[in-house]
């Protein structure tokens, strides 16, 4: 059995601070936000992904993850989120290794597009000011974003995902304490 | 509510958790102070107070209904490899923390017997005594309703 570690030092204020950071990230797609969370999640979970799940996931949001039993136990204890083996039924999908295909995730319905899943994808690093060109709501001209070790087919999958609007999947890219949101409304092109 | 100290069908852990949850913070800290100090414990979930819906059932085959909400404080502590949990009635955070710490200690094979002897069994005896006293008082005021025929 792996040893459980504590979550947020202050459950209320830290969850509010990381919710604010996620809100900022969603409002300004491609801008890197930092989650100043003093937490030590079990490997391979990074601090930003852990803080995002602690802020967003609860007993009503089925969670799919590929991070192993230690992380599953930690999230079950601190979020109370049910872990589901069916990726299509999950409201939050945590990918620490290879990114699952966006097509496999729940995209919601035209009447309830908010039911679409959120993919929390851990990447090697996030660099602003170069790489992909992001345009769309929340971006005045364009934001540039380079994702280190990004899945090769992400841009093609993203084009399909964007075309489904208002249905679709939202993505949170996490690296260390940095977080970038890709809401389904954003358009991405090769830089 | 029926309160039984019999180990069956409850597990041993359910029994000591129930006894710890019924004891007061003063009782727990007094018992704990008499023992050698525990190794440093880590708070996994600081005490937090919430409401739990208590459900009831009229008879064995009745429909479940919501009896009412109850204030419950929960806490989780880790002592070495063991995680102790406490769910206690009321909003006493000190008591929840002590009960969780004692639950963790009681799961540790090396500490179990000493803590059962020094903490749980005396508390269980005291709680039994209180219940017996209440039962005696209630029994003294009991009125048996007999029909006139049986009275004569």
Image (tube, coloured by chain):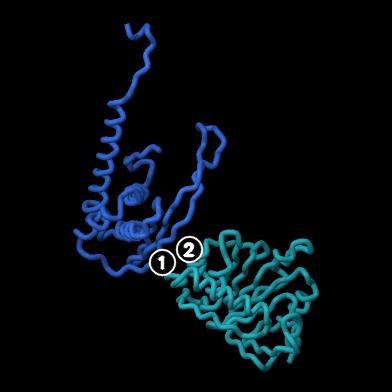
Chain colours: A cyan, B blue
Q: Where, by quadrant of the figure, is residue B73 drawn?
A: bottom left
Q: Position of residue B89 (x, y in %)?
A: 40, 50
Q: Residue at x 64, y 64 (%)?
A: A90
Q: Which mark is residue A77?
A: 2
* Mark 1 closeness class: few <14, some 14–19, many ≥20 residues within 10 Å: many
| Chain for numbered disc 1 | B
Q: Residue at x 74, y 84 (%)?
A: A188
| Mark 1 and mark 2 residues within 8 Å of each other at the beta carbon | yes
**Outermost residue to the bottom:** A130
Count of numbered circles on the image:
2
Q: Which mark is residue B44?
A: 1
**Outermost residue to the front:** B141
Q: As displayed, is residue B99 above or below residue B11? A: below
Q: As displayed, is residue A70 above or below residue B28? A: below
| Chain for numbered disc 2 | A
Measure the alpha-carbon separation of dots 1 and 2: 9 Å
Q: Could you say whether the residue bearing mark 1 is in a helix, strand or loop?
A: strand
Residue B98 or residue A176, whichever sits in front = B98
**Residue B107 visible in image:** no
Q: Position of residue A23 (x, y in %)?
A: 63, 75
Q: Could you say whether the residue bearing mark 2 is in a helix, strand or loop?
A: helix
Q: Position of residue A62 (x, y in %)?
A: 60, 62
Please identify the quadrant where the C terminus of chain B is shown: top left
Q: Position of residue A163 (x, y in %)?
A: 80, 75
Q: Where, by quadrant of the figure, is residue A121 drawn?
A: bottom right
């Amino acid at each position: 059995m792996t040893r459980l570690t504590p979550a947020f030092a202050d459950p209320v204020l830290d969850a509010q601070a990381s919710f604010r950071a996620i809100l900022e990230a969603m409002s300004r797609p491609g801008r890197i936000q930092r989650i100043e969370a003093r937490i030590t999640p079990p490997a391979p979970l990074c601090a930003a992904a852990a803080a995002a799940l602690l802020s967003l996931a609860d007993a009503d949001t089925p969670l799919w993850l590929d991070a192993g039993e230690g992380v599953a136990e930690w999230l079950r204890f601190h979020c109370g989120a049910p872990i589901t083996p069916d990726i299509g039924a999950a409201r939050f999908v945590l990918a620490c290794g290879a990114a699952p295909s966006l097509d496999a995730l729940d995209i919601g319905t035209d009447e309830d597009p908010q039911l679409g899943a959120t993919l929390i994808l851990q990447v090697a690093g996030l660099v602003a000011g170069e790489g992909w060109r992001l345009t769309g709501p929340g971006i005045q001209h364009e934001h540039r974003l380079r994702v280190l070790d990004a899945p090769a087919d992400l841009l093609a999958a993203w084009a399909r995902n964007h075309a489904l609007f208002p249905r679709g999947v939202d993505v949170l890219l996490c690296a260390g304490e940095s977080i970038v949101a890709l809401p389904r409304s954003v358009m991405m092109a090769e830089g | 509510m029926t309160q039984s100290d019999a180990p069956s069908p409850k597990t041993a852990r359910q029994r000591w958790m129930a006894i710890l949850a019924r004891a007061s913070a003063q009782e727990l800290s007094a018992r704990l102070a008499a023992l050698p100090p525990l190794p440093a414990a880590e708070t996994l979930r600081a005490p937090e107070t919430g409401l739990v819906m208590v459900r009831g059932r009229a008879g064995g085959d009745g429909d479940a209904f919501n009896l009412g909400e109850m204030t419950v404080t929960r806490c989780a502590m880790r002592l070495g490899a063991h995680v102790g949990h406490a769910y206690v009635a009321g909003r006493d955070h000190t008591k929840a923390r002590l009960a969780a710490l004692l639950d963790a200690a009681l799961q540790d094979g090396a500490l179990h017997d000493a803590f059962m002897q020094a903490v749980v069994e005396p508390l269980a005896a005291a709680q039994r005594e209180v219940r017996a006293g209440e039962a005696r008082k209630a029994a003294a005021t009991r009125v048996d309703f007999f029909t006139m025929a049986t009275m004569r």
